[in-house]
Image (cartoon, grey):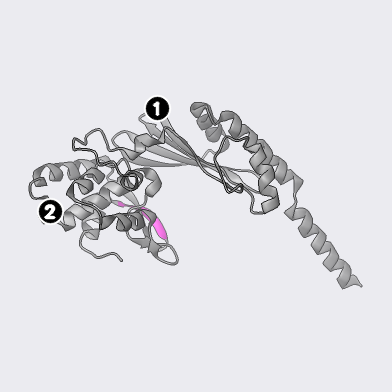
Amino acid sequence: MRNFLIIILIFQVGNIHSQNPFWTDKDKRLIKKIVELVDSPNKLNEYFSEKNKSPRNSRLGFGYWTKSSRIGAGYIGISCDFYFFKDSLISYVLKPELPEKKRKKKKYLEWYSNKFEVIDDLQIKPKYYNYDIFKKPLKQFNGELIKDEQIAYYMSPESGLYYGGGGGFSMNLLQNRKLFKELESSLNKEAVIQLMYSKNPASRLTAIEYYFRNPELFIQEKENLDKWTEIVFLQVPFIRTLNGCIGGMENSKEITQRYSKINIE
């Protein structure tokens, strides 16, 4: 009998925990605050700064930088990547979340108040503010722009800011590397040069790595590209990478030269 009562008690506690009304209320208040600020970028940035005192900042070079922040609530949290040019906020990508349980999702979607695009009634997409600017090359690019959505996405920070090969417990390819390999077979010389002017530093280095590996394709452009690569290395002297499961920063020039001499599968 005693064992039976213990089992019942454990079940009830677990059930209360899984339906914690305090967590739900915290989620509701967070969502409603985000909805209130979503069309006011600077106020949204101030709110995230107030709630998260330790965001992760990344230097993109050429005056651009990003601040990644997350606010946790109950069952969910909401993340935002803010993008700056010098001291001015110019863009953001806001990433809302939904709880895992299907019956909770519909309630949460109502709180988001149609401010976010919903897929199949149960999936919610990020909110992009002025993000197209990051799909375009740096102002130093003077070639003819190749208008291709896959290339444009790869040039943006969302293609991944870690440069290298593979990482993590499973040693899967890093996101930026994986996307480049999907592009690589369709790239011509002009496309590679355009990628070397990406606002994403990992994409710039991967394109420079390609140039180092295939110098015979760029004989006419060699002088200008050599000058540009040195500028790139000076702008972001260190880049985020993964060595196995250990993340860190490495010298941009040295790591690019190293990867240009190996085959990454």
Mark 1 or 2 closer to N-term? Answer: 1
Label 2 near label 1: C-beta < 8 Å?
no
Question: Which residue ends up furthest to the front in the rendered image?
Answer: 120
Q: Pointer 2: residues within 10 angstroms few (<14), some, or many (20+)?
A: few
Viewed as shown, does residue 163 lie left or right of 262? Answer: right
Residue type beneath disc 1: Ser
Crowding at mark 1 (Cα within 10 Å: few <14, some 14-19, many 20+): few
Would residue 61 appear left or right of 89 to someone viewing this image?
A: left
Mark 1 and mark 2: Cα distance apart in space: 39 Å
| 109 inside magenta stretch | no
Left or right position of 133 against 263? right
**Viewer-nearest of discs 1 and 2:** 2
Q: Position of residue 17 (x, y in %)?
A: 75, 54
Quarter of the figure with residue 28:
top right
The residue labelled by disc 1 is: 88
Q: Who's the residue at 20% across and 40% down the image?
A: 231
Q: What secondary structure is marked by label 1? A: strand
Residue closest to the eye, 125 or 54: 125
Q: Which residue: 14% across, 42% down?
A: 227
Q: Position of residue 175 (x, y in %)?
A: 39, 55
Q: Residue at label 2?
A: 217
Instruction: Read off the magenta span.
Output: 246-250
Dot 2 falls on a residue whose secondary structure is helix
Q: Main secondary structure of the magenta part?
A: strand
- The residue lying at 30 percent from left, 48 percent from top is 203
Percent x, y of residue 47: 56, 32
Quarter of the image where the C terminus is located: bottom left
Q: Amino acid at mark 2?
A: Leu
Instruction: Establish if 219 lies above or below 168.
Output: above
